[in-house]
Structure formats: structure tokens, C-alpha cells
Amino acid sequence: MLNKKTVWTPQEILKEMERRTDFGKEHLEIWRKGLEALGLEMATDNEVIEHFKKATGISRFLSLGKEEVLIVALDLPTLLAQRPDWDTATRWGSWWVFELFNRVASAKGYPIIDIYKEQATRPNFLQNMPKAAYASLLGHGNEEVFAGYQNEYILWFGDEQSGKVMQGKAANFLSCLVGAKLLPWLIDQGMEMAHGYFVTYYFVINRNAFPNSYAKWFFNAHFTFDKAILEGKTAGEAHQLTYDKYSEYFRSDEVPWVCKVYLLHDRDGMQLFGNQNWKLTEEEQPPSKWAPSVAFITLEVISSKRDTLVIPEREVYKAYPGETIYIKGKVVDKENQEYGVPYPHIRLVYEDKILGETVGDNNGNFEIPLKVDFEPGQYKLVLNFTGETGKA
């Protein structure tokens, strides 16, 4: 099917029929043909729906007792790959997407939509992503933007279409910094699962040895996630396997130090967002054996004065339980951001509980120590400039 769902209750199909979605129209036609073959000609969609309700036990016309009727499909979900291939980074990356995602998925029988080179545009993505359940996506990025061919914006923070097209979807992003702000926002908009990096993703190449040499360790590690998903692992299990693969290469005597330091950087900047129990092919998802070993803290920034901005040093922090981290930043004038608001009163809040507060210096700089007493997992904290100023 064109999504991961392969098992439906009659009620779910009825809802799609009544909404006249493409999926619902497909089943209306299936039932219409079946009823006609039985000698019952249906004049309208509503009459087909009534017979569907009676035959499946939704209405009281036919009681199925304790039987539970389900409709099951054997088709494999459709997948999508984006491979812009227009500069050094995307040229190398595109080759590895094809080798470690497209080829592996095709060998398992999955249909793949391959958005390659100049086809990696916003319109093509918006047209094809709704057809796919899972995507492996390559492109340049920053905290708010994921890009395609020649850096055309594909998805971006705050964009209604970006949020809508990823609703119910899952994807692995090979891109810089998108995990800092874009991916958490997409999850908030209804994306099921996202895996990516909240740091700049670095990899090492030998320009004279395309496409292998040093690059293999980075891409083999990253695409461990896709491989695990295609093998039926949960997202959490796939994340742990990917983390372990980066760690294995970091410890390996075969890997040169010029690669090891960046492998460690990429590993520690990798994060799973959304449903850690998500799976590609099964309707029911068993509990994952994986649990994060660290707390991921995302900051939501608020200023009570409209003419000021709160600029945090970082928007995503990663810390082990019991560790003390320091939330730093600056409060500035919105029109003249070189001007710091003197002695701003700053609070750090989680679910209406104040975790820390401070008064910044005369240039607007502030620092709040935070002892991480959270269990491992994902948390959103509010960093708030109260609007009050003055020395403590």
C-alpha cells in the first residue's frame, strides 16, 4: 500500500468511504463490482456503503457475534529517497543513498520513489511524499530548513504545507542541524517519527577515491538506521543500532583518527524524535527494548516584551541524568540586536514549575545552571524573559 497500514477494521474503511478519499473510493469500487457480480446493481455510493455496513456487521442487519472482522493487505509500503547530487557533499551522499537504501529496499521488494538530481524540488517532494510511508532524505540543512537540489527549500519551520505533507510519515534525515528545530516542529505537526542530527553533520572523503575510502564509515553508520527499519526493527531499536555502529567505528583500529573524531561528533549529535515504537510494516507495534540513555532538552523561547528577543546559545541540549548543564543566552532589542537589554530577569520553566531563574548582566547576557533530574527522554522547557529588569 501507499502507507504503512496493512490492517483495517470495517469502521476505518467505512470512514474512508464516507469521506470519499482515494482509499475510500478504491473500496467503493471493489464493493460495487462484487455486488454487481452477485446480481445486485447499486445506483449510488451510499447504497454501496449501506451493503458494506450490513455485510461487515457494522449495522444490526447481520450479527457476526464475537467474530472480529479485519481487512488485510499484502502489499509492501512505498518508500521515498531524495538525492540532490549537485555539489561535493550531495554527490557523495547521493551515491550512498542509492547503494545503502535504494538497493537494499528494492532487494526486499519495496517500491521506491527516487527523487534524484534536479528532480529534488519542492513541488516534486510535495507531490510524491504523500504516496510514501517512509523516506530516506539527503540534503543540506540548518536549524529551520531542509533543502534539495541547489539548496531549494523543501521543508521549513512554520510552513503549513511542510507540516501537512509530513503528517503520519516517518523519515531518516541526512542533513545538518535539522534536529535542532525543524524535526521537533514536524513532530508537533503530526509527523510520526523523524531521525536526524541537531549538529552540523561532518564526513571525511578522499577526493581521489570516489565514492568509498574514508566516507564508507560515515555512511555505513548513518544508513544502519534505514537498514534496521527495513528489517522490521522499531525506530528506537534502529536508533540504538546506529549509535552502536558509530561507536564500533570509533573504537576500530581500521578507522583513522581524522574520521574517528567526526564519527563521535555525528553520533552524539544524532537524535530520534516522535514514536520510538514506530515500525514500517506491522500494524501493531510491540514495546521497544530501546530506551534513551540521555535527556534531550529543547528550548521554547518567550519574551514578555514585544520589542525584545531572547537568543539562546543553543536550542537543544543533551545531558545525562544528574549532570549539570548551563543554559546561556542574551536578551537584545528587536530592532537593534547589537544592543543587549541590561539586567534581564530570565526564568526556565517546565510544566509550570520554575527550574531556575537569574538576572543577566548589563549587556543582556545570562546563564542558568540546571541540574538534570529528568529521566532519559525528550523534554521541552520554556526560556522566558519576564519583561522585568534590574540588578538582583
Image (cartoon, rainbow, N blue to C red):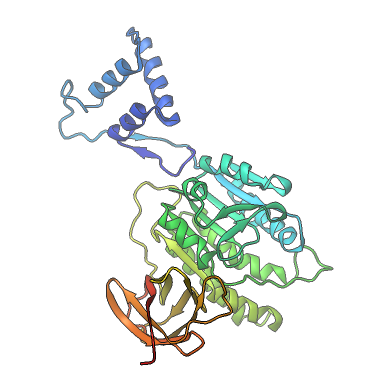
Q: Nearer the viewer, residue 27 or 110?
A: 27
Corner quadrant of residue 129: top right
Mark yes or no: residue 110 visible: no
Mark yes or no: residue 171 visible: yes
Q: Nearer the viewer, residue 183 or 134?
A: 183
List x then y, in percent, for residue 179.
52, 66
Q: Where is 10 relative to 338, above or below?
A: above
Corner quadrant of residue 197: bottom right
List x then y, in percent, for residue 322.
36, 86
Q: Is residue 319 left or right of residue 340?
A: left
Corner quadrant of residue 15: top left
List x then y, in percent, for residue 327.
44, 82
Q: Residue at x 46, y 50 (%)?
A: 280
Extreme residue toward the right, this view: 208
Q: Where is 169 relative to 139, above or below?
A: above
Q: How many marks?
A: 0
Q: Is residue 130 left or right of residue 368?
A: right
Q: Residue at x 55, y 51 (%)?
A: 135
Pick the quarter of the image with the C terminus: bottom left
Q: Nearer the viewer, residue 383 or 174?
A: 383
Q: Residue at x 57, y 74 (%)?
A: 336
List x then y, in percent, for residue 26.
43, 25
